[in-house]
Image: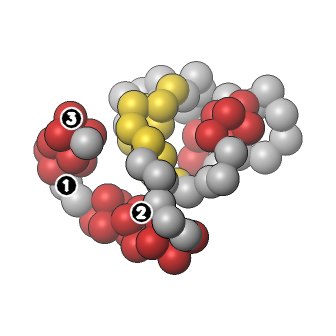
Amino acid sequence: MYVVVCFDNSYYCGITTNLERRLKQHNGEIKGGAKYTRSRRPCRYVYTKKAMNRSIASKEEYKFKKLSRKKKEEYINLG
């Protein structure tokens, strides 16, 4: 699971098996990336967490996305 902060100071959370490639996709260096981040470039990682498998990573992502902005910031800072 990873969290990027975008140019507009918003957070985007996702999961990937290749952090380097995924950030390049979000920043438009290679094809792919999320529609959300296209208009909010550049993005940079503020948090990453390795999970044992995709299922666990998806559950962590889901939990993070449900948090308020304040709770997301606490999660990132305590991570």
Q: Report how far apart the C-alphas of labels 3 and 1 lie in the structure.
A: 14 Å
Q: Amino acid at mark 2?
A: Glu
Q: Secondary structure at mark 2?
A: helix
Q: Report how far apart the C-alphas of labels 1 and 2 lie in the structure.
A: 14 Å
Q: Secondary structure at mark 1?
A: loop
Q: Does the residue at mark 3 contact the one at mark 1 (Cβ under 8 Å)?
A: no
In the image, what residue occupies the spot 51% across and 26% down?
A: 44
Q: Nearer the viewer, residue 45 or 70?
A: 45
In the image, what residue occupies the spot 63% across and 40% down?
A: 19
Q: Is residue 3 above or below residue 57?
A: above
Q: Is residue 37 visible?
A: yes
Q: Report how far apart the C-alphas of labels 2 and 3 lie in the structure.
A: 16 Å
The picture places residue 29, in percent across and down from the top left corner, at: 79, 27
Q: Is residue 1 above or below residue 59?
A: above
Residue picked out by circle 3: 77
Residue picked out by circle 1: 68
Q: Nearer the viewer, mark 3 or mark 1?
A: 3
In the image, what residue occupies the spot 47% across and 46% down?
A: 2
Q: Amino acid at mark 1?
A: Ser
Q: Is residue 73 visible?
A: no
Q: Does the residue at mark 2 contact the one at mark 3 (Cβ under 8 Å)?
A: no
The picture places residue 35, in percent across and down from the top left corner, at: 65, 49
Residue picked out by circle 2: 61
Q: Secondary structure at mark 3?
A: helix
Q: Is residue 8 above or below residue 14?
A: above
Q: Amino acid at mark 3?
A: Asn
Number of labelled discs? 3
Q: Nearer the viewer, mark 1 or mark 2?
A: 2
Q: Is residue 63 above or below residue 79?
A: below
Q: Nearer the viewer, residue 28 or 47?
A: 47
